[in-house]
Image (tube, rainbow, N blue to C red):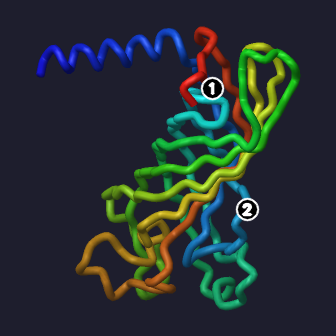
Amino acid sequence: MRYLLVFFLGLLSSQISSAQIYEFGIFAGGSNFVGDVGSTSYISPNQLALGGLVKWNRSPRHAFRASITYTNLKVEDSKSDDPRRIQRGYGFKNGLLEASLGMEFTFFDWNLHDLTSKGTPYLYTGVSVARHENFYFDNSGTLTQENTASWAYGIPIVLGYKYVISPHLILGAEVGARYTFSDELDGSVPDASFREQFSFGNTNSNDWYVFSGFTLTYTFGRKPCYCDF
């Protein structure tokens, strides 16, 4: 078993060292929230979002991607088009730190060693997990912090366009919605079970948040061999 493990590790190391190319860089843009509080517009960034990302280009059509992004969601009923929400007047800020891992698919072949100017649309999806603060609104509408935090798991759905601006730099623009398996980000379902009486909104609809912005990545690595794909 030990020799078999050594063999596979050696094979993986050989593939990585001679047949791949990598990217690392930054994301900068804005964020907005879609749930039981605030506006229901899916693309309406109102707070700064910053992060970093890395990619492992495994073939001309797909890459593994990981990222970390932070934002402070700001949500106000006064920004909604719903008169009932405007009259209710809820609002909150919630710091959110997201980690995401998945696969990016390009619509056209993406060979980073082809120095001719080119671009391609792309689609990214995978899994995400976001740490957020817990709070609730009492019967008078007052926001109360619980001094605890929770993790919201989700599915990122990102559509973007990237373009080679130099032999080692790639500029991209993307909009990414995150569907979460949680209804706690806006305080509509309090984390503590004994505060269930303070639940409100549609408890059958989970929360979304959206990152919109730009990526700038630096490429490095030896010339890849995509002959197996």
Q: Position of residue 214 (x, y in %)?
A: 73, 38
Q: Can the viewer see residue 190 in this picture? A: yes
Q: Position of residue 46 (x, y in %)?
A: 71, 56
Vertical arrangement, residue 188 with respect to residue 134, above or below: below
Q: Nearer the viewer, residue 52 or 169?
A: 169
* Location of residue 196 (image quadrant): bottom left
* Residue lying at the far front of the rendered structure: 228
Q: Write the residue at 49% across / 52% down.
A: 95
Q: Nearer the viewer, residue 16 or 204?
A: 16
Q: Earlier in the sequence, mark 2 or mark 1?
A: 1
Q: Amino acid at mark 2?
A: Ile
Q: Position of residue 123 (x, y in %)?
A: 66, 48
Q: Amino acid at mark 1?
A: Gly
Q: Write the residue at 50% across / 49% down.
A: 126
Q: Secondary structure at mark 1?
A: strand
Vertical arrangement, residue 145 with respect to residue 25, above or below: below
Identify the residue under disc 1.
25
